[in-house]
């Protein structure tokens, strides 16, 4: 059974930093393509970025609001995905979900329960 | 940037058919997925690659995609189908894009 468990959310001041973690199990983490998706309170879903695992290495892609401020990485030895968030803004306040593809190739086939990030002074 | 537009809300009577549209430029040239999100829960894939249903999703859920519009249809709607629904597609300029979301109310 695929499980994704996010952690690391909390309250941070504008301009601050936070690192989210996502512990994965039940799938081959080292070859998985994984994404972060966020949802502001009462709002819709927004893709943040993804990490692609390829034989030649790992690559990352980001949505426009995350470029230059957020960094996705992983530690395959710990089956953990990270989202390093810097220069946080109030508009980054959201529930952050970790997702991975399912057996059908759907990039958002599995979701964690999310971790809440609140950016406020 | 690429945008996907959905109606904010759709109301349907139990046993009737609900149709949720998702509009985007040349959307028919892309694969569309649909996600169901119930209050306090994480989203779940309801339809992927326009019309395929994951295991565990009832047959009353179906999808289509042509031109600039994709449609999620829920036949014989039940109270348990009350949720928010989001379409999603991949665009070469914006990567993954989610629709604005539709709240389905079963009256």
Image: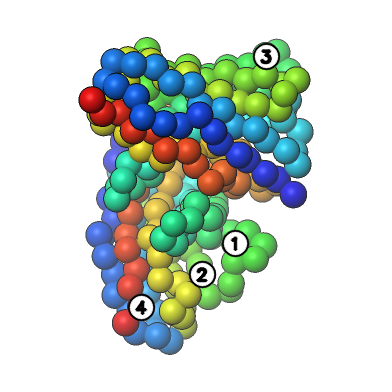
Residue in view at x 37 percent, y 42 percent: A39
Tell me whether the residue at label 1 lies in contact with that at label 4, contact meaning CB atoms closer than 8 angstroms: no
Q: Please tell me the numbered disc located at residue B106.
A: 4
The chain holding disc 3 is: A
In front here: B20 or B64?
A: B20
Q: Is residue B44 above or below residue A91?
A: below
- Lateral position of residue A30 relative to residue A120, left or right: right
- Near mark 1 (Cα within 10 A), the count class, few <14, some 14-19 or many ≥20, is many
Residue in view at x 30 percent, y 28 percent: A119
In front here: B2 or A13?
A: A13
Residue A40 in the image: state x and y as whole percent.
Answer: 32, 41
In front here: B103 or A95?
A: A95
The chain holding disc 4 is: B
CA separation, marks 1 and 4? Answer: 22 Å
Q: Please tell me the numbered disc located at residue A57.
A: 3
The chain holding disc 2 is: B
Tell me whether the residue at label 3 lies in contact with that at label 1, contact meaning CB atoms closer than 8 angstroms: no
Residue B21 in the image: state x and y as whole percent.
Answer: 33, 61
Residue A103 in the image: state x and y as whole percent.
Answer: 70, 46
Disc 1: which residue: B53
* Front of the two marks 1 and 4: 4
Task: Please report whichever mark, 2 or 1, sits nearer to the chain's N-terminal start.
Answer: 1
Q: Are marks 3 and 1 on the same chain?
A: no
Disc 2: which residue: B61
Q: Are marks 2 and 1 on the same chain?
A: yes
Task: Please report whichever mark, 4 or 2, sits nearer to the chain's N-terminal start.
Answer: 2
> Residue lying farthest bottom?
B15
Q: Are marks 3 and 2 on the same chain?
A: no
CA separation, marks 3 and 4? Answer: 48 Å
């Amino acid at each position: 059974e695929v499980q994704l468990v996010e952690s690391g959310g909390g309250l941070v001041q504008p301009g601050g930093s936070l690192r989210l973690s996502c512990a994965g199990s039940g799938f081959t983490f080292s070859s998985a393509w994984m994404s972060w998706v966020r949802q502001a309170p009462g709002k819709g879903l927004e893709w943040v970025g993804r990490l692609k695992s390829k034989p030649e290495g790992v690559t990352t892609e980001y949505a426009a609001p995350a470029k230059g401020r957020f960094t996705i990485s992983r530690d395959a030895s710990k089956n953990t995905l990270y989202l390093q968030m810097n220069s946080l803004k109030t508009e980054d306040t959201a529930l952050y979900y970790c997702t991975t593809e399912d057996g059908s190739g759907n990039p958002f086939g599995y979701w964690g329960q999310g971790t809440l990030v609140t950016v406020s002074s | 940037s690429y945008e996907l537009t959905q109606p904010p809300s759709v109301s349907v009577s139990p046993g009737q058919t609900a149709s949720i549209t998702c509009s985007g430029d040349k959307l028919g040239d892309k694969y569309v997925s649909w996600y169901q999100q119930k209050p306090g829960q994480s989203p779940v894939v309801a339809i992927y690659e326009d019309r395929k249903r994951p295991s565990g999703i009832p047959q009353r859920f179906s999808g289509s995609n042509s031109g600039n519009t994709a449609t999620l249809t829920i036949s014989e709607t039940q109270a348990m189908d009350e949720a928010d629904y989001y379409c999603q597609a991949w665009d070469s300029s914006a990567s993954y894009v989610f629709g604005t979301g539709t709240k389905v109310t079963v009256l």
